[in-house]
Amino acid sequence: MKKLLTAFLFITIINNNSAFQQTTDTITVAFWNLENLFDVMDDPKKEDEEFLPSGTKEWTRERQDKKMYNLSRVIRSMNNDKGPDILGVCEVEHQALLDSLVSKFFPDKKYKTAYLESHDGRGIDNGLIYNSKLFSLISVRGDTVKLNDGYPTRLVLNVNLAYRQAGLLTKEKDTLRIYVNHWPSRRGGETQSEPNRISAAETLRHSVDENFLANRNVKIIIMGDFNDEPGNMSLTNYLRATPFYCDSSEYYDSILLDLMNISYPDYAEGSGSYKYKDDWNMLDQIIISNSLLFDEHFHYICDSFEVYKPNLMVTHSGKFEGTAFPTYGGSRYLGGYSDHYPVIAKFYLGKN
């Protein structure tokens, strides 16, 4: 019986995909850790002294403007120089920085932002940039991660979008849940700090379960810098994000599962978004609900996940050849982009 079901699903999906390619738009979804995008003003409630003109990083308006310009070049280069339709980001001090990035460098785009200030000690938060031609904002919520030591960390940003087809808002049920994450770091050691990331995973999973309880077919995209890799316990055991391969029988069984980690195949092949010493780490990931595998009008394009490495931000020589060209190397200003590469996935959004 299982073989018959698998065969039926295979034929159905292949037939549907051939039709989708003729009648759909491609949606580009990305995530990027922007590496300390601070403004130059002192926030007395945050530990931002390092990134002030008088701080150890000597962070000036000129350096801020250069970084914004660099970020905009990479963002615009995504999606064949058309820019992404959804971009989650982390390590941003205030929403005004995202708003300025959008208004100054993308006046030709219909980009809007979603953002919440968190209680993070350094004041670096998560945000979302989205194409308002395709998506309409319904709500923004922040899920608080409570750590055992009480230290405040980033909110899990929970954004609810309605999506459009052929320029028109679709039915009310056609909504997309986006979760943007930046889980606690590995400072102090991976093992010692692991309970903090497990706490973040439990917080996110609780919110995801609330959505599944309200609508079993809810469309969810989870993205972020998890400071853990797809095979770590926080993601596999606590978030319960299942490794997903498009070309295996697990594809057809995945209708019984709920969260699929589409970053896993690249991770298993040794790819990564961040290089620590001599090891590539897949810290930046995209995870989807199973409805985005099978939904008729909005679904993941298999094997489209990639670590995005545009030539302009790759270090081409020296000890760090191949890594992302950062803004700082330790305390030395380099004038680069970020120490993380973005990650990208593509989806089909059917037209009316």
Image: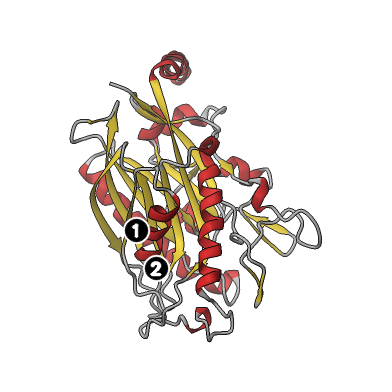
The percent position of residue 60, horizontal first and vertical second, equals: 53, 76
Element assignment for label 1: strand
| Relative to 281, residue 271 above or below | above
Residue in the picture at 45% in, 19% down: 21
The amino acid type, in three-letter code, at marker 2 is Arg
Left or right: 39, with 119 as reference point? right
The quarter of the picture where residue 134 lies is: top left
Left or right: 350, with 302 as reference point? left
Element assignment for label 2: loop
The amino acid type, in three-letter code, at marker 1 is Leu
Spatial CA distance of label 1 from label 2 is 9 Å
The quarter of the picture where residue 330 lies is: bottom right
Q: Name the residue under label 1.
A: 157
| Relative to 124, residue 238 above or below | above
Q: Is residue 262 visible?
A: no
Looking at the rendering, in which quadrant would you find the C terminus? top left
Looking at the rendering, in which quadrant would you find the N terminus? top left
Q: Can residue 2 be seen in this view?
A: yes
Observer-nearest of 274 and 136:
136
| Relative to 58, residue 5 above or below | above
In the image as oriented, which residue stretches furthest toward the left?
172
- The local crowd at label 1, few if under 14, some if 14 to 19, many if 20 or more residues have their Cα within 10 Å, is many
The percent position of residue 155, horizontal first and vertical second, equals: 35, 65
Residue in the picture at 80% in, 63% down: 319
Observer-nearest of 312 and 305:
312
- Which label number is shown at residue 154? 2
- Which label number is shown at residue 299? none
- Number of numbered discs visible in the structure rendering: 2
The percent position of residue 116, horizontal first and vertical second, equals: 31, 64
The percent position of residue 113, horizontal first and vertical second, equals: 33, 54
- The local crowd at label 2, few if under 14, some if 14 to 19, many if 20 or more residues have their Cα within 10 Å, is many
Residue in the picture at 59% in, 45% down: 308
